[in-house]
Image (cartoon, rainbow, N blue to C red):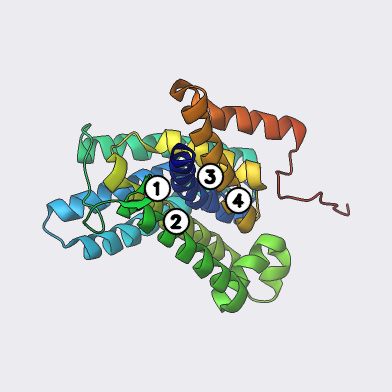
Amino acid sequence: MSEFLQFVFAGLKSGAIYSLIALGFTVVFAATGAINFAQGEFFMLGGMIGVWFTHMGVPLPAAVLLSIISTSAIAAVFEILAIRPIADGDPLRIIIVTIGGSIVIRQIALHLFGPDEMPLAGFSAGPSFMIAGAAIERQTLWIWGITTVTVAALFYLYRWTTLGQAMTATSLQRDAARLVGIDTSWMVTASFALAGALGAVAGLAVAPLTQTAFDVGAGIGVKGFAAAILGGLGNPVAAVGGGLVLGLLESMTAGYLNPLYKDAVALVVLLGVLFIRPQGLFGGSRREKV
């Protein structure tokens, strides 16, 4: 039982991170109808910028806040310079631009921060907690708490704030949103900024456990995308569910089959969902009038 619980805790830890990445994919997809394959690089930038600020002598809480703001600003600039000029075109063009943008961001990070892995201090010190013989690191509790607060904040943003309602209107019907006075271009920019903040939060939360480097974004991006597809792309709640399911599947595969298969789980899940249930586990069928 203790071994099983340990695998469950590990899976929920990974799943919470995948959920934050999947939410970033979902937010941008809702606004543009395209997949932002630079989302993994926002995860990388969050951790790397946070480490850089701490090396500059900035206290950890301030470094975390500045990293989130900086990454969000970079995501907004990326949308303005690279996405906005082609925003009304084929979504495939946007996807290609985001892939190219991820490569550029990764190379810039390599030149700015170097090739070495960098550690970030844990958010709180102390021994792990023990539950029925299974250990839970303090940073894991932070990850779960941050994910819960983030999901609640997103729910509040979209349900109760003017900005969130404007972003929702833009995602549902952009032309109608323009007619009622919503600046849809800036709503898309706000969606990218929000996706950048979500990626940065995930990168900062996991960096104390795994360290961070310029090349960590590609792998986590694939897993976040798989989680979003697994849950049902376009639905924030489904994205969280997909992330948790994917994390548990990875953990159980590594624990009971072979750790070498762990990274293949995301690809197998992605292909399986696309072939068998394209709308995702928690998505329903959708009808459109033409």
Q: Nearer the viewer, residue 64 or 17?
A: 17
Give the residue type that dot 2 points to: Leu
Q: Which comes sooner in the sequence, label 4 or label 2?
A: 2
Q: Are dots 3 and 1 in contact, CB under 8 Å?
A: no
Give the residue type that dot 1 points to: Phe
Left or right? Give the position of 90 relative to 119: right
Could you say whether the residue bearing mark 4 is in a helix, strand or loop? Answer: helix
Q: Nearer the viewer, residue 166 or 245?
A: 245
Label 2 Cα neighbours within 10 Å, binned few <14 / some 14-19 / many ≥20: many
Residue 224: percent from left, percent from top: 52, 42
Q: Nearer the viewer, residue 90 or 126?
A: 126
Please give the label number shown on residue 42: 1
Residue under label 3: 36
Residue 117: percent from left, percent from top: 23, 35
Residue under label 2: 198
Q: Which comes sooner in the sequence, label 2 or label 1?
A: 1
Residue 71: percent from left, percent from top: 35, 55
Residue under label 4: 241
Cα gap from disc 3 to disc 4, whole angstroms: 20 Å
